[in-house]
Image: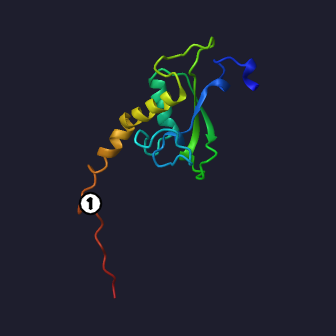
Amino acid sequence: MVYLDKTHADKERFICIYPAYINNKKTLSDGRRIPVEKAVENPTFGEIRDVCTAAGLNVVVENKLYPREWNRDVQFRGRIRIQLKNEDGTLCFEQFPTRKAVMLYVAEMIPKLKTRTQKSGGGDQNTQPGEGGKKSKKKKK
């Protein structure tokens, strides 16, 4: 019982959320914790942090890697710790009574982020085929 001397306000008592928990590309055995219909495609720890801080949650970011993650790239790193309960044991927000409620809320809000909405629509504005390309040079004999 390591946490007997810790209060709910200590960072060690915050819940942990890895991006793999809400990734729709992962299977349950790979670590996904919510239904695939509600999950998000390749979330990052930064997106999770942004959504949680916008909701008013107390958030701590740690440079940890999910143990089941086979890919060691930087984009898959990151663990978010979120405070659910106050020091006296009452909920910080009635909207988030459990870890699963936080994960479902984050998965619902990530597609609405500006970074996600701009990536899908802004890519084809600058690409026009046939303009501005290099002319091919012929070889001299």
State the residue at coordinates (53%, 46%).
28
User: Which quarter of the figure is the C terminus placed in?
Assistant: bottom left
Residue 140: which quarter of the image?
Answer: bottom left
Residue 107 location (% of width, % of height): 44, 35
Q: How many marks?
A: 1
Where is 70 relative to 1, above or below?
A: below
Residue 119 location (% of width, % of height): 35, 44
State the residue at coordinates (38%, 37%).
111
Where is 107 relative to 56, above or below?
A: below
User: Which quarter of the figure is the N terminus placed in?
Assistant: top right
Residue 95 location (% of width, % of height): 46, 20
Q: Nearer the viewer, residue 45 or 100?
A: 100
Q: Please, which residue is most extreme toward the bottom here? A: 141
Number of residues whose C-alpha sits closer than 10 Å to that of mark 1, classed few (under 14), some (14–19) or many (20 or more): few
Q: Is residue 2 left or right of residue 28?
A: right
Q: Amino acid at mark 1?
A: Gly
Residue 62 location (% of width, % of height): 62, 34
Where is 103 relative to 4, above or below?
A: below
Q: Nearer the viewer, residue 77 or 85?
A: 85
Give the colour scheme of this rendering.
rainbow
State the residue at coordinates (29%, 44%).
121
State the residue at coordinates (28%, 55%).
127
Q: Nearer the viewer, residue 21 or 110?
A: 21
Which element is circle 1 on? loop
Determine which residue is flagged by label 1. Answer: 132
Where is 111 relative to 56, above or below?
A: below
